[in-house]
Every structure is written in structure tokens, then in C-alpha cells.
Image (cartoon, helix red, strand yellow):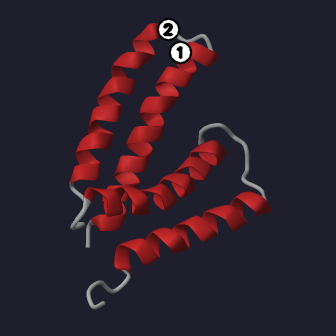
Amino acid sequence: MWTIPTYILAAFAEIGGCFAFWAWLRLGKTPLWLVPGVASLVLFAWALTRIDADFAGRAYAAYGGIYILASLAWMWVVEGARPDRWDAAGVSLCVIGALVILFGPRGGP
């Protein structure tokens, strides 16, 4: 029940943390951006361990699709660049793949 919201939290925490480093190294912001950046990356790691999955690899694989969706949302909302139709097509494929990994039936041969 909390899987998708937890993935979304993890994605935005990872993106925010990485963006803090981007802002410092690529946009010339103060190194003080690293303080909330590192805290955000710690939140990301903690959130990803809260995912209800039998194996870490499966949790991480499914996270990839959610991360791509969140990255495009970040690009649009924070950076002001609207995703194009190719972004939409690509993220659709990735999210469908993530949902298959997460919710596909398990067991049997």
C-alpha cells in the first residue's frame, strides 16, 4: 500500500540530493548546498529500504521506472523544461516495466 508513495519519496530525495551537487559544481552555488543535499541522499537511502520487496535487487529495479518519472517531473517543475513526446513515451515504457517487476505474480516454475 505504501510502496508507490515510498518510491516517490525516495526518487525526489535522490534527485534533490543530486541536484544540490549539480547546483554547486555546475551552477556555481555555494558549497553550503551540500548540507541539505547529503541529508536528502540519506533520506533517499532510508526510504528505499522501506520498500516491501523480497529482494533488494527487485526493489531497486522497480525503483528505476519511478525515478525516471520523477526526474522528468523535476525537469518540468523545477527546471522549467517541459518533457516532449519522446520523454512521455520513454517514461511510459519504464513505469509499465517497473509495475510489472513490482506487482507481477511470483512463484511457480
Q: Residues within 10 Å of mark 2 (few under 14, many from 20)?
A: few
Q: Is residue 18 left or right of 6 when viewed as pictured?
A: right
Image point 34% across, 18% down: which residue? 35
Three-letter residue code for mark 2: Thr
Q: Residues within 10 Å of mark 1 (few under 14, many from 20)?
A: some
* Quarter holding residue 89: bottom right
Q: Position of residue 82 (x, y in %)?
A: 73, 50
Q: Nearer the viewer, residue 79 or 41?
A: 41
Of badges 2 and 1, the one in the foreground is 1
Q: Is residue 23 above or below residue 93?
A: above
The quarter of the picture where the C terminus appears is: bottom left
* Quarter holding residue 38: top left
Image point 62% across, 69% down: which residue? 92
Residue topped by disc 2: 30
The quarter of the picture where the N terminus appears is: bottom left
Q: Is residue 57 above or below residue 15?
A: below
Image point 24% across, 66% down: which residue? 53
Q: Are marks 2 and 1 in contact (CB under 8 Å)?
A: yes
Q: How many marks?
A: 2
Image point 33% across, 57% down: which residue? 57
Residue topped by disc 1: 24
Spatial separation of the CA atoms under disc 2 and disc 1 = 6 Å
Give the residue furthest to the right: 85
Three-letter residue code for mark 1: Trp
Q: Is residue 48 left or right of 67 when viewed as pictured?
A: left
Q: Is residue 4 above or below residue 32?
A: below
* Quarter holding residue 32: top left
| Of the image marks 2 and 1, the number of the one nearer the N terminus | 1
Give the residue furthest to the front: 109
Q: Position of residue 101 (x, y in %)?
A: 41, 72
Task: Label 1, secondary structure: give it.
Answer: helix
Q: Position of residue 78 (x, y in %)?
A: 59, 39
